[in-house]
Image (tube, helix red, strand yellow):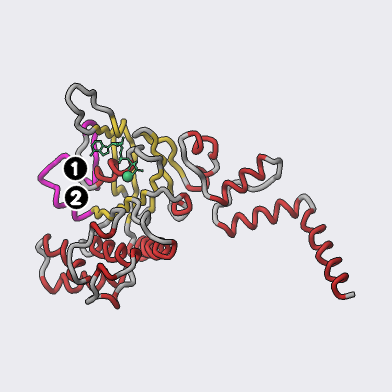
Amino acid sequence: MEMLRAEELCFSYPAGEGEARVPVLDHVNLTIEKGSIVAVLGHNGSGKSTLAKQFNAVYLPSGGKMWVEQFDTANEAVLLEIRRRVGMVFQNPDNQIVANVVEEDVAFAPENLGVSTEEIRRRVDDALAAVGMSDFTRHAPHLLSGGQKQRVAIAGVLAMEPECIVLDEATAMLDPRGRRDVLDTVRRLNRDKGMTVVMITHHMDEAELADRVVVLNHGQVYLDGAPKEIFQQVKQLRSIGLTVPETVKLLYDLHQEGMDVLLSAISVEECADAVCRALQACGVEESVSERENERGTNYQS
Ligand SMILES: Nc1ncnc2c1ncn2[C@@H]1O[C@H](COP(=O)(O)OP(=O)(O)OP(=O)(O)O)[C@@H](O)[C@H]1O
Ligand SMILES: [Mg+2]
């Protein structure tokens, strides 16, 4: 089942006087299935945030169509239906916190949707539990760490009980620990609640956890496929200013040097395994362990 579908989607920002409008989204065709995790990559200005804002009708198409389930985002009458289904989390957690107490912050959006008081209590508790922040209900958001604030921001979106959550570089301002917390949270929401996740990111290694990677370039879909497929296209990615995960880079460089390594290994474990296998295949490991033995003998003697 489809969650989001862009059909020949075009968009340009209003141009200054006498200037031509530059297309920022240029005939994008993209379907995002319910329950999937999709990473969207692309260099600065490739149109990622603009596309994300089409997903919950912050911007409307200049051409083509944007569908959220069966709802056409251009239809004003269904705006609330769309906003209920697709929640957005942005880069800077400080800009997303609106109240002085965590639970009030999380309650803000459902209150605005006219949800009943008991229902709000349940949703706030559920949302804070889902992001692992139940112990911080009465805390002041501004005293939390970046990662914790971002998790509160996510809880605020979850309290609207959306089917789909769009994270626009939501981990960009976080330290590695905060990033990991947010990514773990997102992965759990996908696994436990079947939530559709669209993750816009500059971090290649974040894209590893996606089912699918979409690469944008100049407002067009440049590559679209499973992470393993996409990251093997090192040359194409580099040609549009993207780097590949460190693991892929290592394997690619070894391959360029003539080593017969598996190029589809992305995680650190897979990569280490691929290198070990390749070394074994060319007999290096044997000589390494022989040397280790020799050294051991020498040391003992
Ligand atoms: N509000 C705006 N008014 C005019 N032009 C804009 C506006 N927002 C973005 N643009 C332009 O649209 C293009 C796409 O911007 P967008 O923010 O969607 O890219 P992005 O891929 O999210 O970039 P980044 O990686 O820097 O976040 C850029 O050329 C940008 O300058
Ligand atoms: Mg952006």
How far is the residue under mark 1 from the one under mark 2?
Answer: 7 Å
Left or right, residue 40 beside residue 12: right
Determine if residue 267 is in view.
yes
Where does residue 300 sit, x and y in percent of width and height? 86, 75
Determine if residue 161 is in view.
no
Identity of the residue furthest to the right in this view: 301
Residue 230 or 236: which is nearer the viewer? 236
Instruction: Return the mark for residue 73.
Output: 1
Residue 105 lies in quadrant: bottom left
Is the residue under label 2 in contact with that under label 1 (CB below 8 Å)? yes
- Ligand 2 placement by image quarter: top left
Residue 121 lies in quadrant: bottom left
Residue at 45% x, 43% y: name it. Answer: 225
Q: Provide the residue span drawn in magenta.
A: 62-85
Where does residue 198 sit, x and y in percent of width and height? 34, 51
Left or right, residue 238 beside residue 63: right
Q: Amino acid at mark 2?
A: Ile
